[in-house]
């Protein structure tokens, strides 16, 4: 058995496999090296596979349009990362770069998913969980980079019931909205008033109507 197949035995995703199965995965796996600061992949790019740090360290981070960064995790030797797009089929949800001279293994997406080919139920469950993890990643991005008004605008857009005229938002208290966007009620109240003043929404008692979705998109 190859040394890589032996190494994969210590990785939780592959530890329960037979030696023959790990050997097959090892044959498909790519090895790549990166210098300190070198980008491994970028957010939004197609996923190449499951990444495993052989040596060195990797930082996984999200970036704002203004260039601000939020580190989601640091992956050390023996750690896997970028699982979400492997299992939900979407693009990379974050970027990754080497913190020092780093060598990684890349197990192709099709190789990982082949392990689940015989169990559709497991595939469906894992895809569901991966989708929820992707959503949590977007929540971190919102909290890190977007203002309360921006997060509020996004919530209203996502919640509005689209119709011919002004679109109503399902009734939510300011406290509930604050909980959903990571803020407090008073700040949400000021944000709603600001959006109403800008002509994006209209507040009628306890009801909120989206009257100009484009202005909400600009605030988002």
Image: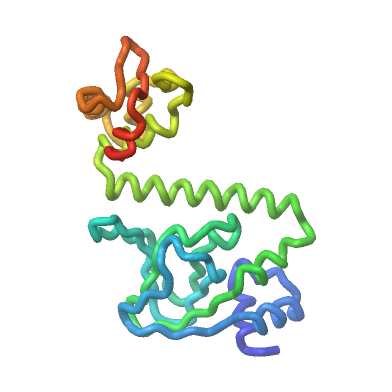
Instruction: Please state the horizontal and vertical placement of residue 13, each as a whole percent of the image.
Output: 62, 67
Q: Quadrant of residue 44?
A: bottom left
Residue at x-position 59% and y-position 72%: 11
Q: Quadrant of residue 86?
A: bottom right
* On screen, residue 113 above or below 186: below
Residue at the front extreme of this rendering: 164
Residue at the top extreme of this rendering: 205
Image quadrant where one finds the C terminus: top left
Residue at x-position 74% and y-position 50%: 121
Q: Quadrant of residue 101?
A: bottom left
Residue at x-position 51% and y-position 65%: 46
Q: Nearer the viewer, residue 7 or 48?
A: 48
Residue at the right extreme of this rendering: 118
Q: Nearer the viewer, residue 179 or 9?
A: 179
Determine if residue 9 is in view. Answer: yes
Instruction: Please state the horizontal and vertical placement of residue 85, each as a whole percent of the image.
Output: 54, 60
Instruction: Please state the horizontal and vertical placement of residue 172, each as a whole percent of the image.
Output: 40, 21
* On screen, residue 198 above or below 202: below
- Image-based side of 7 in relation to 197, left or right: right
Determine if residue 168 is in view. Answer: no
Image quadrant where one finds the N terminus: bottom right
Total numbered circles: 0
Q: Nearer the viewer, residue 214 or 1?
A: 214
Residue at x-position 67% and y-position 78%: 25
- Image-based side of 2 in relation to 208, left or right: right
Instruction: Please state the horizontal and vertical placement of residue 64, each as a whole percent of the image.
Output: 29, 55
* On screen, residue 134 above or below 207: below
Q: How is the image coloured?
A: rainbow
- Image-based side of 161 in relation to 145, left or right: right
């Amino acid at each position: 058995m190859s040394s890589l197949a032996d190494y994969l035995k210590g990785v939780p995703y592959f530890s329960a496999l037979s030696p023959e199965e790990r050997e097959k995965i090892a044959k498909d796996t790519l090895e790549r090296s990166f210098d300190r600061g070198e980008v491994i992949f970028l957010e939004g790019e197609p996923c190449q596979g499951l990444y495993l740090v052989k040596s060195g360290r990797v930082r996984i981070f999200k970036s704002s349009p203004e260039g601000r960064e939020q580190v989601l995790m640091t992956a050390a030797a023996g750690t896997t990362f970028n699982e979400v797009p492997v299992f939900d089929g979407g693009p990379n949800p974050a970027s990754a770069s080497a913190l020092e001279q780093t060598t990684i293994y890349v197990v192709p997406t099709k190789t990982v998913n082949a392990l689940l080919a015989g169990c559709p139920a497991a595939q469906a469950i894992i895809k569901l969980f991966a989708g929820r993890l992707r959503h949590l990643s977007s929540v971190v991005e919102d909290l890190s980079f977007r203002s309360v008004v921006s997060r509020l605008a996004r919530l209203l857009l996502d919640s509005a019931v689209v119709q011919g005229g002004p679109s109503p938002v399902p009734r939510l208290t300011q406290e509930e909205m604050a909980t959903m966007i990571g803020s407090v009620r008073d700040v949400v109240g000021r944000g709603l008033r600001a959006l109403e003043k800008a002509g994006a929404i209209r507040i009628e008692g306890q009801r909120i109507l989206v009257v100009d979705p484009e202005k909400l998109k600009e605030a988002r």
